Amino acid sequence: MTAESPRTGLADSLLRQIAEALATLHAKGTRDAIDLRSLPLTAADRAELEEALGRGEVSARLEIAGQSELWETAYAGVWWLRHMGVGDQVAAESIEITPLPDLLASHPDDIGLAAARLTAELQDKAEEARHV
Amino acid sequence: MSDPGTIGAALAAQGISRRSLLKYTAYLASVLALPPMASRAMAEALANTKRQSVIWLSFQECTGCTESLTRSFSPTLEDMIFNLISLDYHETLMAASGDAAEAAMQAAREANKGKFVLVVDGSVSTGANGIYSTNHGKTNLETLKEVAADAAAVLSVGTCAAFGGIPYAKPNPTGAVPVSEIVTDKPVVNIPGCPPIPEAIAATVAYFVTFGKLPELDHLHRPKSFFGDTIHDRCYRRPFYDKGQFAKSFDDEGARAGWCLYELGCKGPVTYNACATTKWNGGVSFPIQSGHGCLGCSEPGFWDRGSFYKPLSAAVMGNRTLIGGAALAGVAAGAASVALARKRRQAALAEQAAAQKKAQEKTE
């Protein structure tokens, strides 16, 4: 395929949608998300959108069931999430309008397990120290 | 904390954080065309759900459907489906064999009576009472009737199970039929394709586990989220079709420039599947992107519907009214096939609307 990737104007529409969702987040605290994978974005549209939103202060790389990359765009509260699947292809990609994506926060169940694990490890160490 | 026996507990026992589940549900919401905000609720629901018992039966098939689901290069997002299900019987994948394997299936059937999902790949032989395909002393026909009676739902995976596929092709020596001709008293979901798209298999099962019901289906009982559009509707070569730019042979300038493969026999305009968007091998490519037209493998009777290398206006997937149209060139020929696809879709939608109205009237 050698045909050039055209700009369709979808990036402009998305920017308006994001602006509206961001204003709603500020006014009412309502979170929103846009699934980029389901939209017929061309490579040029995607690049245009990424450039327009820019990069902000926070970025994170996650190693869970394949790689994920998250970053806050230059607009606070607008996050870009990119999940990779087989062969490092993009499996899912979305923009979340939220103070913090759920994926970054520790889940209460994981916190509970971590607390139990850390307590057990400290008890083991104390036990070892008594036998020395 | 998740209850013992739940998916959340199983993940925790493997040291897998809940972030994995959240990532997987974000992916599922995307492939199932659900609102992206649904992923959070899906993750919570899945964490507190027991792993879904799945019994997988293989009949007259080539194992390509199993390959489609299991073939991946590294533990990734797409493998997460295996954390949601308990694959209690699968002849090719299970360690047990012979009597031990059959005992495992029996135990799973009894423990999950009315709750397990039955996946079938392959068509069902009915000729000579089904004797052409047997396992453990029973015909596939007998096994299907017995096991389906205890299932919550049946997933016919692959074109052979969904529509008969290649065993069903003329002259059909084994009397092959699709699963839906045998199982008539249970919900049957068809996930056709030769092989089917693995995401379509996994997401349909995951949807059932999450919501406790089947996803919305089309008139051929295919999940609409994967089979709602034709390949042609979502094909990246579509702009060339619209401009009337068609490759005339597989190695001409048009083919090299990525022009539409309609005149080389592409069946994309009458084939409903997600190949053009979900693609294959983790989104690397799909047949049209690799330079070959769509064969229409997820449609009923695809093997008997004329040449793979003649344009639709000549072969027309069984519609003889357009035969002779091969002389039509460019946009005119394309427009005819699109009209055919649209007509077919409108007919299907009308049929569905009528069925919904009927069901509503019945409820009232």
Image (cartoon, coloured by chain):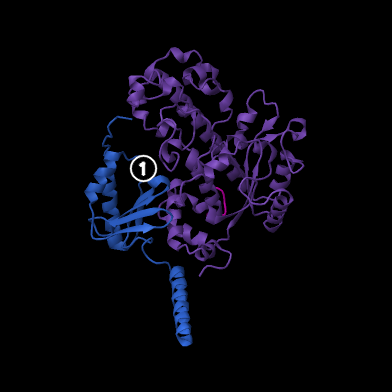
Chain colours: A blue, B purple
Q: State left or right for residue B174 relative to residue A91.
A: right
- x 55%, y 39%: residue: B222
Quadrant in the rendering for residue B66: top right
Q: State left or right for residue B49 relative to residue A17.
A: right
Q: Residue B105, position in %: x, y?
A: 69, 52
Residue B215 seen: no
Quadrant in the rendering for residue A122: bottom left
Of B265 and B317, the residue lying toward us: B265
> At label 1, which amino acid type do we have?
Leu
Q: State left or right for residue B102 relative to residue A83.
A: right
Residue B14 part of the magenta-drawn span: no
Quadrant in the rendering for residue B154: top right
Q: Which residues are magenta?
A: B210-214
Q: Residue B292, position in %: x, y?
A: 44, 27
Q: In this view, which residue lies farthest toward the front?
A: A132
Q: State left or right for residue B96 relative to residue B138.
A: left
The chain letter for the residue carrying disc 1 is: A
Of B326 and A126, the residue lying toward us: A126
Q: Residue A50, position in %: x, y?
A: 26, 48
The number of numbered discs placed on residues in the rendered structure image is 1
